[in-house]
Amino acid sequence: MIRTRRQLLALLSMPALPAAVLAQASPALQAAINAFTGGAPVIDGGIEVGIAELVENGNAVPVTLRVASPMSEADHVRELAIFTDRNPQPDVARFVLGPQNGRAWVSTSIRLATSQRVIVLARHADGRLQRRAIDVIVTLAACIE
């Protein structure tokens, strides 16, 4: 929920992705994301994703996720999830958070099979969902079947 003018301006200044982010996605990715969202509407933006857009080796790609949240009992990020379209499994990672975490911040490494779109979703305590997608170019593939 937007409570101040500053929060509204921050939201409006974020680069928004078109709602058709999944238009070219595989059926497996669409099914994985629908399982996470339960068909609820998703807001584009609001998630800061730290990942290189050009990755030399897909075996260990560092990723940092941040979501602006007071992380209070009533208003906190409950879950963060990473999905990819061209990995053998589209559901790459999920992180469960709570107010005791103090901040909605996660850092990890993932594998990327090839160049593809990385999609991050955040679920808030009030049921709100946010999405951010980034295209990543991988020069040395990983996760080969």
Image (cartoon, grey):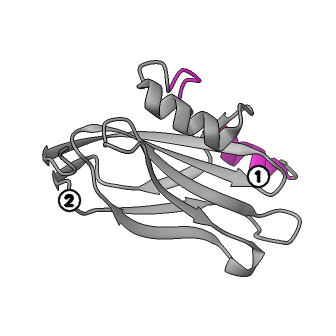
Left or right of 4 in this view: 88: left
User: How many residues crowd around disc 1 within 10 Å: few (fewer than 14), some, or many (20 or more)?
Assistant: few
Q: Is residue 127 magenta?
A: no
Q: Residue pushed farthest left?
A: 140
Q: Which mark is residue 95?
A: none
Does 98 appear above or below 57?
Answer: below
Does 111 appear above or below 18?
Answer: below
Please tell me in which quadrant of the rendered image residue 69 appears.
bottom right
Please tell me in which quadrant of the rendered image residue 117 appears.
top left
Residue 93 visible in this rendered orientation of the protein:
yes
Question: Where does residue 84 sit, x and y in percent of width and height?
Answer: 39, 42
Q: Which residue is identified by label 2?
A: 59
Q: Which residue is identified by label 1?
A: 6
Q: Is residue 19 magenta?
A: yes
The type of residue carrying mark 2 is Asn
Question: Where does residue 32 sit, x and y in percent of width and height?
Answer: 53, 38
Question: Where does residue 1 sit, x and y in percent of width and height?
Answer: 84, 48
Range shown magenta = 4-21
Q: Which residue appears at 62% of the width and 34% of the height?
A: 34
